[in-house]
Image (tube, grey):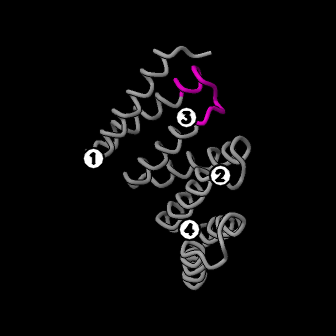
Amino acid sequence: MPTVPELDELASRTELAQAKAHAGDFRGAASEFRALSRDYARTAGADDPQTLAVRLDLARVLGTAKQYARAIDTCEPLLRDQVRVLGPDHADVLETRQLLASLRYSAGDAAGAAEDLEQLLAALSRVLMPTHDRITKVKRDIAFLKRTT
């Protein structure tokens, strides 16, 4: 069981890594998020929601730094773990699906992005009304991607 000081230190380091990312130091932020991911897994457990959140932060930073292949390689196992731990309709899972689709599109994989968005649409359809703006946007994005492949 992690102690409060350990968790407080990890939370402070997470804020520092986020500040680095916001300041444009993507390399420094990515390095810190990698270390945080290992330290959270060791301290709180690999399936702890905060461990998963830090892994998502890492994927975001890698994507922002245009390191799409690394970001995708971070997202794919993260998504599997999130679905297993949090369930397929959790907000973080939906965010990761959206991020993964965006990363694939940026990496030139429009077909893969469309597949990811179709999975996102299925999940959103379970939790939102059919006329919700987000569902409409995802449908539009899928149609666009299918036209480009």
Amino acid residing under circle 1: Gly
Rounded to the nearest whole Å, what is the CA distance between mark 4 and mark 2? Answer: 25 Å
Give the residue at mark 1.
24
Front position in the image: 96 or 149? 96
Q: Residue furthest bottom?
A: 147
| CB under 8 Å between discs 4 and 2 | no
**Distance between the Cα atoms at labels 1 and 3?**
23 Å
Could you tell me which residue is drawn at 51 percent across and 67 percent down?
Answer: 105
Element under label 4? loop
The image shows residue 116 at horizontal and vertical percentages of 63, 65
Give percent across and percent down for residue 68.
Answer: 47, 55
**Residue range (magenta):** 38-50
Q: Nearer the viewer, residue 144 or 10?
A: 10
Q: Nearer the viewer, mark 4 or mark 2?
A: 2
Residue 94 part of the magenta segment:
no
On screen, residue 51 versus residue 57, left or right, reads right
The crowding category of the residue bearing disc 2, from other C-alpha atoms within 10 Å (few below 14, some 14 to 19, many at least 20), is some
Q: Residue 91: give its label.
A: none
Q: Which residue is mark 3?
A: 50
In the rendered image, the quadrant that contains the N terminus is top right
The residue under the point 69% across, 55% down is: 89
Foreground mark, 4 or 1?
A: 1
Given this view, does label 1 or label 3 mark the residue nearer the observer? 3
In this view, 92 is above or below 48? below
The CA span between labels 3 and 2 is 14 Å
Residue type at the position of mark 4: Asp
Residue 109's disc number = 4
Q: Tell me which label, 2 or 1, sits earlier in the chain.
A: 1
Tag 3 secondary structure: helix
Magenta residues: mostly which secondary structure? helix
Does the residue at mark 2 contact the one at mark 1 (Cβ under 8 Å)? Answer: no
Which residue is drawn at the image coordinates 66% and 45% (left, top)?
A: 82
